[in-house]
């Protein structure tokens, strides 16, 4: 019995060794399989592209704002060039040209019509006088914008608009309510009255069609027959200057008064087109009054 017991113990030990060897082989196989498979990515690695995308969005927004700013700068430069060298808008604040231009008219002035001077440029009064570049003379009867030339006037260098009546060398005089140019009376014909409404009352103002030398015709108003401006001395227009008058003859501060002779260098441009007009009935804080106050018949009409 003792010998049998001894022979069975070595058998059991061999069996355990074989099982351990099998388990070690299986562990090696598992390790080889695990090493051949890539390790799963860390959570932080999957989120890494997000900051890159956000940076691209920020750069795109910066480029977009840059394009907007560039477009605005270009637009301002184009507007400045047009206003300086081509056309400039003006608003009529007074009645001196009434009959032709009304208070509330907006118009375009042709800047290149008579060339350029420091007075026709933005902030030109800060520049020294350099004469006129590409200058040309206005025609009798032109409606022009100019800088008030009288340094003693409170309106010195402000924009005025009148009609050219006298050219250099002309003799201008008013006698008994009639205009004389070079000692010859200017023809005029009675026209339909000019009507206006003031404070609810309608007034009729005598109107005439005047024909200047050269054939230019335009309407004038005669509010005060034999008024203080209806008789004058002879004005002899000096070289390089022009004599200006308003179409509302009895209600115009022009070359007969404080304005005096207008130097060619003071010319800003020729009034060409009314593009908008609105009467005094518009109230800015009452939008419903805007539409009824617009003078639609005067919009986009040429100035005679």
Image (spheres, rainbow, N blue to C red):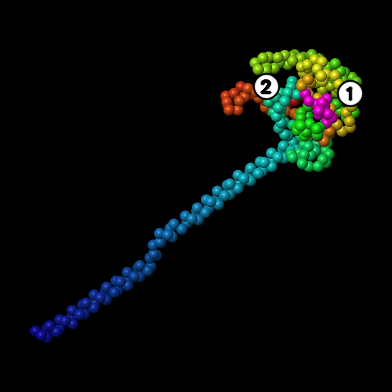
- In the rendered image, which residue does mark 2 sit on? 297
Quarter of the image holding residue 104? top right
Which one is nearer the viewer's eye here, 18 or 208? Answer: 208
Residue reaching furthest bottom?
3
- At mark 1, the secondary structure is loop
In the figure, 156 relative to 304: above or below? below
Q: Is residue 270 visible?
A: no
Q: What is the x, y in percent for residue 8?
A: 15, 81
In the image, taking residue 88 as reference, residue 30 lies left or right, namely left
Contact between labelled residues 2 and 1, with CB atoms less than 8 Å apart? no
Q: Is residue 173 magenta?
A: no
Which one is nearer the viewer's eye here, 102 or 67? Answer: 102
Name the quadrant of the N terminus.
bottom left
In the figure, 207 relative to 103: above or below? above
Crowdedness near tag 2: few (<14), some (14–19) or many (≥20) residues, C-alpha within 10 Å: few
Quarter of the image holding residue 87? top right
Q: What is the x, y in percent for residue 215?
A: 84, 21
Magenta-tinted stretch:
252-262
- At mark 2, the secondary structure is helix
Q: What is the x, y in percent for residue 164?
A: 82, 27
In the image, taking residue 110 as reference, residue 296 lies left or right, namely left
Q: Nearer the viewer, mark 1 or mark 2?
A: 1
Q: What is the x, y in percent for residue 37?
A: 38, 65
Which secondary structure is most common in the magenta stretch? Answer: loop
Q: Residue at x 85, y 19 (%)?
A: 231
- In the rendered image, which residue does mark 1 sit on? 234
- Say whether disc 1 or disc 2 marks the residue closer to the N-terminus: 1
Name the quadrant of the C terminus.
top right
């Amino acid at each position: 019995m003792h010998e049998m017991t001894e022979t069975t113990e070595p058998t059991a030990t061999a069996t355990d060794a074989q099982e351990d060897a099998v388990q070690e082989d299986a562990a090696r196989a598992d390790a080889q399989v695990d090493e051949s498979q890539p390790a799963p990515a860390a959570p932080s690695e999957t989120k890494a592209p997000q900051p890159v995308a956000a940076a691209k969005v920020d750069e795109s927004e910066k480029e977009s704002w840059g394009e907007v700013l560039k477009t605005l700068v270009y637009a301002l430069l184009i507007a400045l060039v047009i206003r300086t060298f081509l056309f400039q808008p003006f608003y009529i604040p007074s009645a001196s040209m009434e009959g032709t231009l009304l208070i509330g008219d907006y118009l375009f002035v042709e800047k290149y019509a008579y060339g350029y001077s420091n007075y026709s440029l933005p902030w030109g009064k800060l520049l020294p006088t350099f004469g006129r570049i590409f200058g040309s003379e206005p025609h009798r009867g032109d409606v022009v914008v100019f800088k008030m030339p009288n340094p003693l006037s409170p309106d010195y260098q402000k924009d005025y608009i009148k009609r050219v009546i006298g050219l250099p060398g002309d003799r201008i005089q008013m006698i008994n309510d009639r205009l004389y140019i070079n000692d010859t009376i200017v023809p005029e014909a009675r026209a339909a009255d000019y009507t206006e409404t003031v404070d609810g009352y309608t007034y009729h103002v005598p109107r005439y069609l005047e024909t200047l030398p050269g054939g230019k015709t335009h309407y004038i108003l005669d509010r005060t027959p034999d008024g203080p401006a209806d008789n004058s001395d002879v004005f002899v227009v000096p070289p390089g200057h022009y004599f200006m008058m308003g179409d509302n003859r009895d209600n115009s501060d022009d070359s007969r008064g404080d304005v005096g002779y207008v130097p060619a260098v003071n010319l800003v441009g020729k009034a060409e087109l009314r593009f908008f007009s609105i009467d005094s009935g518009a109230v800015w804080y009452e939008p419903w009054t805007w539409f009824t106050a617009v003078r639609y018949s005067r919009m986009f009409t040429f100035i005679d």
